[in-house]
């Protein structure tokens, strides 16, 4: 295998390693970090807080109505017991009963409104709980898939590392130094393939004589514009 072919083989392996490592980093970031679940959980918590408040409102309204009902019953017993004969006292008791009845009606209206509001909040809370369950179930499925992909990527990287060690054996030390320097400065691609008489990286035209050198010379030929090592393919 020629010097340039050995470097091209090394670059193909390194680019594969780069892609695998980049995807592995994405997978690691995605595992256990579902924005959908976080949003669903936040909505569920808000709905639960509203439900708790609505239930408390109903309990308060029920207590107020029960207390008022007891007062009304006591007043009605006093009015209708027959124990009071004084017209003024009877008139006063009747006024108290009428007032208590009006307030009782108002409290019952408030209780009804609170119960209606509670039904609406309960429906929203059930919907939020269902959405959270769906999001969590989807996350479990997604994480299982991501965990499988992570295992595959780790195995792939182990294989590529072995292939890279084997490829390095065919690369001269000075060629490897040039390759490493170009790879660092050229975004990971130290070599470019000739494509239709041009550098496949920067697009500059390569003369016929230079193309012949790229194809046949044992020396490494670099693109006159971008400086990458040219590979005939």
Image (cartoon, helix red, strand yellow):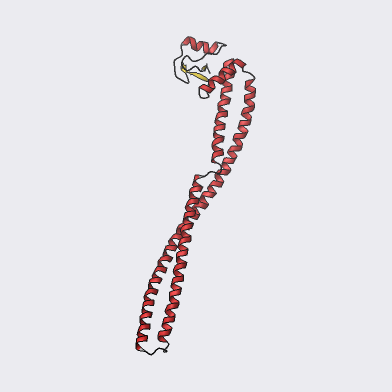
Q: Is residue 147 above or below residue 225?
A: below
Q: Residue at x 55, y 20 (%)?
A: 181
Quadrant of the rendered structure where residue 95 is? bottom left
Left or right: 155 with respect to 222?
Answer: right
Q: In the rendering, at what x and y percent does residue 41 appear?
A: 50, 51
Along the viewing direction, whichever of 109 and 233 lies nearer the viewer:
109
Q: In the rendering, at what x and y percent does residue 14 appear?
A: 57, 25
Q: How many numbered badges does the structure rendering display?
A: 0
Q: Is residue 40 above or below residue 186?
A: below
Left or right: 158 with respect to 73?
Answer: right
Say whether residue 53 is visible: yes
Q: In the rendering, at what x and y percent does residue 57 appear?
A: 45, 65
Q: Residue at x 43, y 78 (%)?
A: 71
Q: Is residue 130 above or below residue 185?
A: below
Q: In the rendering, at what x and y percent does residue 194 appear?
A: 49, 17
Along the viewing direction, whichever of 53 and 121 lies nearer the viewer:
53
Quarter of the image with the N terminus in it: top right
Along the viewing direction, whichever of 186 and 110 lies nearer the viewer:
110
Residue most extreme to the top: 209
């Amino acid at each position: 295998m020629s010097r340039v072919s050995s470097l091209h083989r090394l670059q193909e392996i390194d680019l594969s390693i780069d892609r695998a490592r980049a995807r592995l980093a994405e997978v690691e970031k995605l595992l256990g970090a579902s924005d959908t679940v976080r949003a669903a959980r936040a909505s569920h918590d808000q709905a639960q807080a509203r439900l708790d408040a609505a239930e408390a409102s109903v309990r308060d309204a029920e207590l107020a109505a029960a207390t008022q009902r007891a007062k009304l019953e006591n007043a009605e017993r006093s009015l209708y017991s027959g124990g009071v004969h004084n017209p003024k006292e009877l008139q006063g008791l009747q006024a108290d009963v009428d007032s208590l009845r009006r307030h009782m009606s108002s409290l019952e209206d408030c209780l009804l409104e609170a119960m209606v509001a509670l039904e609406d909040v309960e429906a929203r809370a059930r919907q939020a709980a269902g959405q959270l369950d769906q999001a969590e179930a989807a996350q479990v499925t997604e994480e299982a898939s991501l965990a499988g992909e992570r295992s595959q990527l780790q195995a792939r990287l182990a294989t590529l590392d072995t292939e890279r060690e084997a490829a390095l054996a065919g690369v001269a030390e000075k060629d490897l130094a040039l390759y490493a320097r170009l790879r660092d400065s050229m975004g990971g691609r130290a070599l470019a393939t000739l494509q239709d008489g041009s550098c496949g990286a920067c697009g500059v035209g390569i003369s016929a004589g230079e193309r012949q050198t790229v194809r046949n010379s044992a020396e490494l030929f670099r693109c006159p514009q971008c400086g990458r090592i040219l590979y005939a393919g």
